[in-house]
């Protein structure tokens, strides 16, 4: 029986693993509906239930869209932990060990499938936001930059989620990562300005990774000055990737040894 290797992935191998993960997502109707409908419900919830009571100096839908985008991206990317843990507990990894399949392809398949699912939900959120009054005033270059930042964030959270999925032993435990991923946008500038928070929360909100990503998206989508947010956002995402990718390799090797 051959062992899974952490060698570079062949192109055909990677395509097969990505296709497999996308098919699994399509067959899991409950999870698919949740990933697509949750962004819609959250957008409507924040705009129509909370928006009238929150003063951000502009229309609330204009302020909140970047935060909802990131909240939904965090939730969707965090589901990678459950997918990875499920593979480890249902015996499918043992089947892959009989074939010359790299660990990079298996884990990368989950990450790419996560990005694909979240791209669809992002488009859905943006379409709904425009329908209820969001009016981005930016050129194509800024749209491209905003998508690039969001994609980098999705990549970082998906790999970190994969590492968490390798660390725990059951899919139920892995689902706990979704709580952490969904919590971080709340103590940030996603839904209210940071300066309105109590001082003991403001310090955390100012120096956690989600805030500069949201501020970057907000500036890019609304055409306002970006300030120092973009380099901070990119640095946070690259830092998470620099830790999570090697950690995932180490944890995978230990789990399948």
Image (cartoon, rainbow, N blue to C red):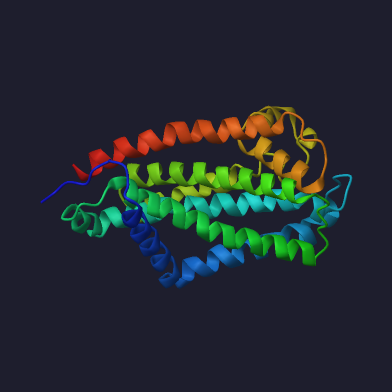
Q: Quadrant of residue 227?
A: top right
Can residue 159 be seen here? The reply is yes
Q: Nearer the viewer, residue 165 or 144?
A: 144
Q: Quadrant of residue 248?
A: top left
Residue at 42% across, 64% down: 22
Q: Is residue 18 left or right of residue 134?
A: left
Q: Is residue 68 left or right of residue 164?
A: right
Q: Is residue 58 above or below residue 22?
A: above
Tell me residue 96's x, y (percent): 22, 56
Residue at 60% across, 34% down: 234
Can residue 172 be seen here? The reply is no
Q: Nearer the viewer, residue 18 or 211?
A: 18
Residue at 52% across, 49% down: 179
Tell me residue 214's x, y (percent): 69, 42
Q: Is residue 48 left or right of residue 87?
A: right
Residue at 29% across, 46% down: 103
Q: Nearer the viewer, residue 143 or 42?
A: 143
Q: Quadrant of residue 205?
A: top right
Name of the residue lying farthest toward the front: 11
Name of the residue lying farthest toward the left: 1
Name of the residue lying farthest toward the right: 57
Tell me residue 212's x, y (percent): 67, 35
């Amino acid at each position: 029986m051959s062992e899974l290797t952490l060698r570079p992935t062949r192109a055909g191998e990677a395509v097969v693993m990505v296709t497999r993960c996308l098919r699994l997502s399509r067959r899991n109707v409950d999870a698919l509906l949740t990933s697509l409908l949750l962004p819609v419900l959250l957008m409507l919830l924040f705009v129509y239930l909370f928006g009238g009571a929150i003063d951000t100096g502009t229309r609330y839908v204009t302020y909140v869209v970047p935060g909802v985008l990131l909240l939904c991206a965090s939730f969707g990317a965090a589901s990678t932990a459950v997918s990875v843990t499920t593979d480890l507990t249902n015996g499918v990894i043992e089947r892959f060990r009989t074939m010359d399949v790299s660990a990079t392809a298996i884990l990368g398949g989950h990450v790419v499938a996560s990005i694909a699912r979240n791209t669809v939900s992002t488009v859905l959120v943006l379409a709904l936001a425009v329908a209820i009054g969001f009016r981005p005033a930016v050129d194509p270059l800024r749209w491209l930059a905003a998508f690039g930042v969001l994609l980098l964030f999705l990549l970082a959270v998906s790999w970190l989620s994969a590492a968490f999925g390798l660390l725990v032993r059951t899919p139920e435990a892995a689902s706990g990562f979704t709580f952490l991923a969904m919590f971080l946008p709340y103590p940030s500038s996603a839904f209210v300005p940071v300066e309105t928070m109590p001082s003991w929360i403001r310090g955390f909100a100012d120096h956690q990774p989600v805030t500069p990503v949201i501020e970057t998206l907000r500036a890019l989508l609304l055409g306002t000055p970006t300030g120092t947010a973009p380099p901070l956002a990119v640095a946070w995402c690259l830092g998470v990737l620099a830790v999570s990718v090697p950690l995932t390799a180490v944890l995978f090797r230990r789990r399948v040894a």
